[in-house]
């Protein structure tokens, strides 16, 4: 059994987490991709690492994404705090669109230089679909009662 050092524990937790944990460098190139990311997006570590984040960003959202990403890399500042939970659409390897909730961590080196961004993501597609169905049923009931 390995020694349970903080480094080993950190690596094990990141690697085995069911959430997608991804790190992209200053250019938006994926440098870390865990098992959760493979399960959610369908790409293996070998397929994802070294690729641009466009791998999982729907085409119509890429311009806005890169505008914000470049701004954060240039300024070192994000408008999203550690407690903010962001919601965005994403793409799986098979082209399926999914809904994600995620938080980000700005990763800085020992000299406090921004090196990239880590994201911890969860697939909430099923919950979003259930919510849309609930809203549709409610709207139908309201329309029926207003007749």
Image (cartoon, grey):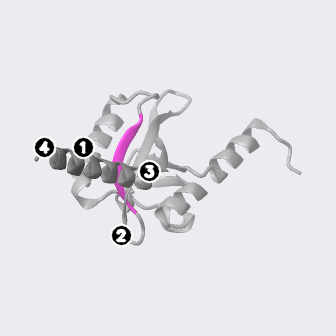
Q: Which mark is residue 124?
A: 3
Q: Closer to the camera, 135 or 6?
A: 135
Give the CA distance from mark 1 to mark 2: 24 Å
Give the CA distance from mark 4 to mark 3: 33 Å
Per the image, the residue denoted by label 2 is: 95
Closer to the chain start, of discs 1 and 2, is 1
- Image quarter for residue 10? top right
Against 98, is 107 above or below? above
Residue 14 pos. (x, y %): 63, 47
Classed neighbour count for the residue bearing mark 2: other residues with Cα under 10 Å, few (<14), some (14–19), many (≥20)? few
Q: Is residue 34 visible?
A: no
Q: Which residues are magenta?
A: 85-91
Classed neighbour count for the residue bearing mark 4: other residues with Cα under 10 Å, few (<14), some (14–19), many (≥20)? few
Q: Is residue 97 magenta?
A: no
Give the CA distance from mark 4 to mark 1: 45 Å
Closer to the chain start, of discs 4 and 1, is 1
Q: Which mark is residue 97?
A: none
Per the image, the residue denoted by label 1 is: 67
Taking the image as shown, residue 9 lies to the left or right of residue 53, namely right
Closer to the chain start, of discs 1 and 3, is 1
Per the image, the residue denoted by label 4 is: 146
- Residue at the location (45% across, 38% down)? 103
Give the CA distance from mark 1 to mark 3: 25 Å
- Residue at the location (33% across, 57% down)? 57
Give the CA distance from mark 2 to mark 4: 41 Å
């Amino acid at each position: 059994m390995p020694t349970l050092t903080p480094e080993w524990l950190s690596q094990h937790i990141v690697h085995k987490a069911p959430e997608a944990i991804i790190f992209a460098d200053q250019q938006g190139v994926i440098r870390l991709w865990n098992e959760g990311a493979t399960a959610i997006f369908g790409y293996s570590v070998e397929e994802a690492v070294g690729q641009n984040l466009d791998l999982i960003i729907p085409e119509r959202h890429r311009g806005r994404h890169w505008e914000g990403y470049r701004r954060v890399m240039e300024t070192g500042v994000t408008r999203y705090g550690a407690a903010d939970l962001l919601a965005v659409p994403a793409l799986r390897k098979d082209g399926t669109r999914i809904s994600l909730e995620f938080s980000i961590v700005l990763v800085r080196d020992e000299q406090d230089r921004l090196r990239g961004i880590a994201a911890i993501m969860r697939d909430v597609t099923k919950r979003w679909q259930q919510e849309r169905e609930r809203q549709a049923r409610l709207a139908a009931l309201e329309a029926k009662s207003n007749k």
